[in-house]
Amino acid sequence: QVQLVESGGGLVQAGGSLRLSCAASGRIFGIDSMGWYRQAPGKQRELVATVSSGGITNYADSVKGRFTISRDNAKNTVYMQMNVLKPDDTAVYYCNLVRGIITYWGQGTQVTVSS
């Protein structure tokens, strides 16, 4: 089993920055892919960014150039630095870990960007 715990969310003004962290515990393998998704009220959950075990990253077009995902395999932690935040970035952000056909999710952390 894998447990994921997110932290770092909060309230910030437009143009500000936040850094999200997701600590994984349990049986973690270096081949696992990790990422961040978000869900705004009334909308479907959407991909924000992913990072493979080898460090290959993928971003949603809406966050390219503003968000940076990274991982520390020694600490079983994935981070996401979010800069130049916009009100449209307001959502609950979820961390996930993918191992083959199994996906684990964290409980989510709220990010609110005021205009």
Image (cartoon, rainbow, N blue to C red):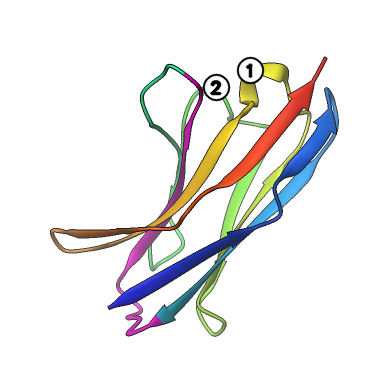
Is 37 colored magenta in this rendering? yes
Name the residue rendered at 35%, 78% in the picture. Answer: 30
Residues tagged 2 and 1 counted as in contact (Cβ below 8 A):
yes
| Residue 11: percent from left, percent from top | 79, 36
| Residue 71: percent from left, percent from top | 55, 66
Q: In which quarter of the image is the C terminus?
A: top right
Q: Closer to the camera, 70 or 86?
A: 86
Q: Give above or below for 6 relative to 42.
A: below
Is 103 colored magenta in this rendering? no
The answer to whether any part of residue 57 appears in the image is no
Q: Relative to 12, is 46 on the left or the right?
A: left
Tell me if mark 2 has few (under 14), some (14-19) or many (20+) residues whose alpha carbon lies within 10 angstroms of its own.
few
The mark found on residue 62 in the picture is: 2
Cα distance between the residues tagged 2 and 1: 10 Å
The mark found on residue 88 in the picture is: 1
Q: Of discs 2 and 1, which sits in the foreground?
A: 1
What segment is highlighted magenta in the picture?
26-41
Q: Where is residue 33, by image quadrant?
A: bottom left
Q: Relative to 11, is 26 on the left or the right?
A: left
